[in-house]
Image (spheres, helix red, strand yellow):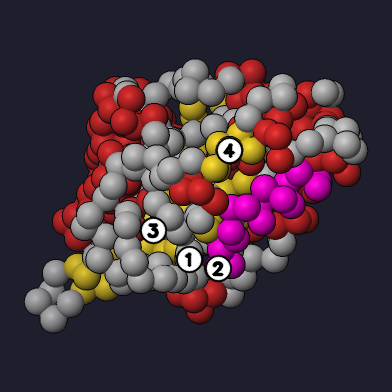
Amino acid sequence: MRSILVTGSAGFIGANLVKRLFNEMAEGLVIGFDNLNDYYDVSLKECRLRETEKFGRLSTVNYKFIKGSISNRDLVNQLFAEYKFDVVVNLAAQAGVRYSIENPDAYIESNIIGFYNILEACRHYPVKHLVYASSSSVYGGNKKVPFCVDDRVDNPVSLYAATKKSNELFAHCYSKLYNIPSTGLRFFTVYGPAGRPDMAYFGFTNKLLKGETIQIYNYGNCRRDFTYIDDIIEGVVRVIKKAPEKRNGEDGLPIPPYKVYNIGGGQPENLLDFVQTLQEELIRAGVLPQDYDFEAHKQLVPMQPGDVPVTYADATALERDFGFVPKITLREGLRSFAEWYKEYYKP
C-alpha cells in the first residue's frame, strides 16, 4: 500500500479510515478527497478533517486532502495520473434513503456518474485493488434473514439502494473486461462518535435535547444490524490488504477478480430496545437530566417509504476470508457516542 486514494474522506467512515491508515502504513501516501457538500452540517465534516490532519502530522505517511467531487471526471483523471494509486477506497456517495426520494439528481450525479468516473480512472490508470462502499439497502424488502451476499437483490425499494446495486454491477463489468480487482462492502447501519447526523441515534439525541418528539417507525417493530465504526474500519483495512486474485478461466479470459461482502454486526437490535439503551447512555453521560420523561417524547408511527423492517447481516464470508468478527456491543458503542456528544456539543 504505497499510494492510497480515499474518496469521501471527510465522511464518517472515510475520516476514521484515513486515521487508521496512518497507523497501518510505515510510509507512502494517502490522498483524501471530498466535496464537503451540505447534505448535513459541514462543520462536522470540517472537524473530522482537522482531526485527520492532526493525526497526519504525527505520522510518517505523507497525507494530502483535496477538495473536489468524483463527478468531476477531469479532476478524477488528473488525480490518478499524478499519484498512480495502488489502492482506491471509494466511500464518496450521496447517502440517505429518504433523501433519495426528495432529491434524486444528487444520487445519479454522485453514485452513478461519480462511480463510473472512478471505474474509468481505474481502467486507464490501473490499480491493484478497488474497494467501494455498497449498502445493506440493496436487500430491499427481502423476507429471508439473515441477508446473504448470494441472495437476489433485484427489487430495491429506494433510489439510493438502486444506485448501490448499480455500483456492484458496474464493478463486476469492469473487473471482467479490464481485470480490475474490486471488492464491494455492504455496510449495515454504521454508528459511533462524530457519525452522520441524519442517522437515527444522532437525530434522536438532537430532538430529545430540544424537547422534541422522536418518531419510531413501523410502530417500533423494526430491527437494525448496528455496526460500530471501529469494527467497520477493522473490516475495511483487512479487505484492503487482500485483493481478489487475478486468474484466467478455461477460455483464457479473465475470471472477474470481484468480491462482495456484508460487513455488519450480525446481531440485529429491536428499535425500541435500541432507544432504551440510547436514553440510558445519554443520561449517564449527562447529555440529558436524570428525570427526563422519555415516554412524553416518543411517538410510534407507520413505516416510511423506502425503509425496510429489518436489516440482518450474514457476515460469515468476511469471517472466513479475513478472520473478521465485530467486537463492540451496542451499549459500548452508544456510550462512546454519548460521551463524544457531550464533549462536542457541550449541551
Asked if marks 3 and 1 touch (Cβ < 8 Å), the reply is no
Q: Secondary structure at mark 2?
A: loop
- The tag earlier along the polypeptide, 3 or 1, is 3
Q: Which residues are magenta?
A: 266-281
Disc 2 from disc 1: Cα separation: 5 Å
**Alpha carbons under labels 3 and 4: distance apart:** 40 Å
Left or right: where 152 falls relative to 322:
left
Residue 284 x, y percent position in the rendering: 88, 44
Is the residue 329 above or below the residue 285 in the image? below
Disc 2 to disc 1: CB gap under 8 Å = yes
Label 4 to label 1, Cα distance in Å?
Answer: 28 Å
Give the residue at mark 2: 266
Q: Residue at x 55, y 68 (%)?
A: 266
Q: Is residue 127 magenta?
A: no
Q: Nearer the viewer, mark 2 or mark 4?
A: 4
Spatial CA distance of label 2 from label 4 is 28 Å
Distance from disc 2 to disc 3, alpha carbons, whole Å, reads: 20 Å
**Secondary structure found at label 3:** strand
Disc 1 on helix, strand or loop? loop
Query: Looking at the image, which residue sits at the far left?
Result: 251
